[in-house]
């Protein structure tokens, strides 16, 4: 075996995905709708593999600024990586840990290439791809309700999910749950930016926060609240975050983003449970098809990912263009 460490890393990646993946199949089994489980699994797996492809590509391609210095990057961008693991293995783990709310790292996320850092943040900002033990599907469920409602209106069919009609009340709760996550992250990031710019004396009294000002410094602050809100634990460690400001604000972001949405998700279940079961008919919207899976993916991207696009533009995307 040429590189047992690399193989071990891949095995460990899949091992932390086993429970989140199994929960999706368990859903289809217990609902007796295996096709629905396969569709949900397919959407999550596609998003996960897309992130893996992007991160491995950019980490193995290396840093163009280091190329200009005449330094060989045949092994890829090695800054912040362990020599026993190449950048490809680190990139694989960076995606796996952020889609599973795992929190562990095998390299410094702060040192990954700009778009790799963006993918790491988006995995937690979207927070629906597998997730920890159940958390991924809980958020996916809210988007599922939105997708059912929108799809039903688009094709003129009754918006139903599992035999229960999806109406305005469920939509309102699902929308609030879906938008609360970006609201908390972006509001706290805006507050930290305001304090950094307009109260430098306070920042200095806490030892200074940013070792990397500019585009990357903004990404460090955005990542911190994203990780706190999405039940992860990793960070862009160029940020000096062991201060009163960061401990208190991250604690608030953690409580709001991790616990309050559960109330909404359980409320949707309660609302649907109280409704009369409606047998499927020719007018019922099918939720166990590839078409509906694509629709759900698009809703997640539009509602969740695009909510963070302006912030990512100021951080990772701007940094990418500044380098390339």
Image (spheres, rainbow, N blue to C red):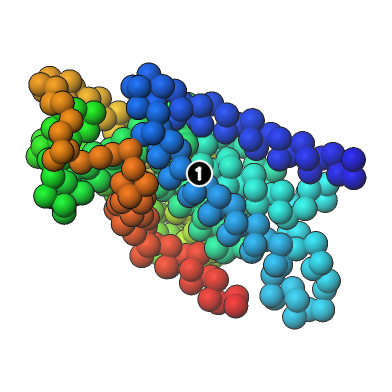
Instruction: State whether residue 185 appears in this view.
Output: no
Q: Depth check: 75 or 160 in front?
A: 160
Taking the image as shown, residue 270 lies to the left or right of residue 139, namely: left
Q: Residues within 10 Å of mark 1 (few under 14, many from 20)?
A: some
Q: Quadrant of residue 161?
A: top left
**Residue 81: horizontal and vertical position, in percent?**
74, 52
Taking the image as shown, residue 222 lies to the left or right of residue 106, namely: left
**Residue 120: horizontal and vertical position, in percent?**
53, 51
> Which residue is drawn at the image coordinates 71% and 48% (left, top)?
89
Q: Secondary structure at mark 1?
A: helix
Instruction: State whether residue 282 appears in this view.
Output: yes
Q: Quadrant of residue 135?
A: top left
Circle count: 1
Quarter of the image that includes the N terminus: top right
> Which residue is drawn at the image coordinates 59% and 52% (left, top)?
52
Q: Depth check: 321 or 131 in front?
A: 131
**For mark 1, what is the residue?**
45
Above or below, comparing residue 186 to residue 249 in the picture? below
Q: Quadrant of residue 174?
A: top left
> Which residue is drawn at the image coordinates 41% and 48% (left, top)?
125
**Residue 20: horizontal and vertical position, in percent?**
50, 30
Quarter of the image that includes the C terminus: bottom right
Above or below, comparing residue 248 to residue 202 in the picture? above
**Residue 145: horizontal and vertical position, in percent?**
23, 39
> Which residue is drawn at the image coordinates 13% and 40% (left, top)?
283
Taking the image as shown, residue 76 lies to the left or right of residue 153, namely: right
Q: Residue furthest front?
A: 282
Q: Residue furthest right?
A: 2
Q: Depth check: 133 or 183 in front?
A: 133
């Amino acid at each position: 075996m040429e590189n047992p460490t690399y193989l071990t890393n891949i095995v460990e990646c899949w091992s932390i995905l086993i429970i989140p993946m199994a929960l999706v199949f368990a859903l289809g089994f217990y609902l007796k709708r295996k096709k629905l489980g396969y569709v949900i699994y397919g959407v999550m797996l596609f998003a996960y593999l897309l992130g893996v492809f992007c991160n491995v590509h950019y980490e193995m391609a290396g840093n163009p600024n280091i190329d200009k210095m005449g330094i060989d990057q045949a092994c890829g961008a090695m800054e912040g990586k362990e020599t026993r693991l190449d950048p490809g293995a680190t990139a694989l783990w960076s995606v796996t840990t952020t889609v599973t709310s795992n929190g562990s790292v095998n390299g410094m996320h702060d040192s990954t290439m700009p778009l790799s850092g963006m993918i790491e943040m988006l995995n937690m900002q979207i927070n629906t791809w597998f997730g920890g033990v159940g958390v991924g599907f809980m958020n996916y469920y809210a988007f599922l309700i939105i997708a059912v409602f929108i799809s039903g209106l688009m094709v003129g069919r009754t918006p139903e999910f599992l035999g229960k009609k999806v109406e305005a009340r469920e939509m309102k709760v699902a929308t609030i749950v879906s938008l609360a996550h970006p609201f908390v992250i972006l509001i706290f990031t805006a507050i930290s930016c305001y304090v950094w710019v307009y109260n430098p004396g306070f920042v200095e009294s806490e030892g200074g926060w940013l070792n990397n000002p500019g585009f990357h410094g903004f990404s460090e602050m955005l990542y911190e609240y994203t990780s706190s809100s999405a039940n992860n634990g990793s960070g862009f460690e160029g940020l000096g975050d062991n201060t009163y400001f960061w401990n208190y604000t991250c604690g608030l972001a953690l409580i709001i983003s991790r616990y309050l949405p559960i109330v909404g998700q359980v409320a949707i279940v309660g609302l649907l449970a109280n409704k009369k079961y409606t047998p499927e008919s020719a007018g019922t919207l099918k939720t166990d098809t590839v078409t509906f899976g694509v629709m759900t993916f698009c809703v997640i991207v539009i509602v969740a990912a695009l909510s963070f696009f302006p912030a990512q533009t100021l951080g990772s995307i701007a940094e990418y263009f500044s380098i390339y």
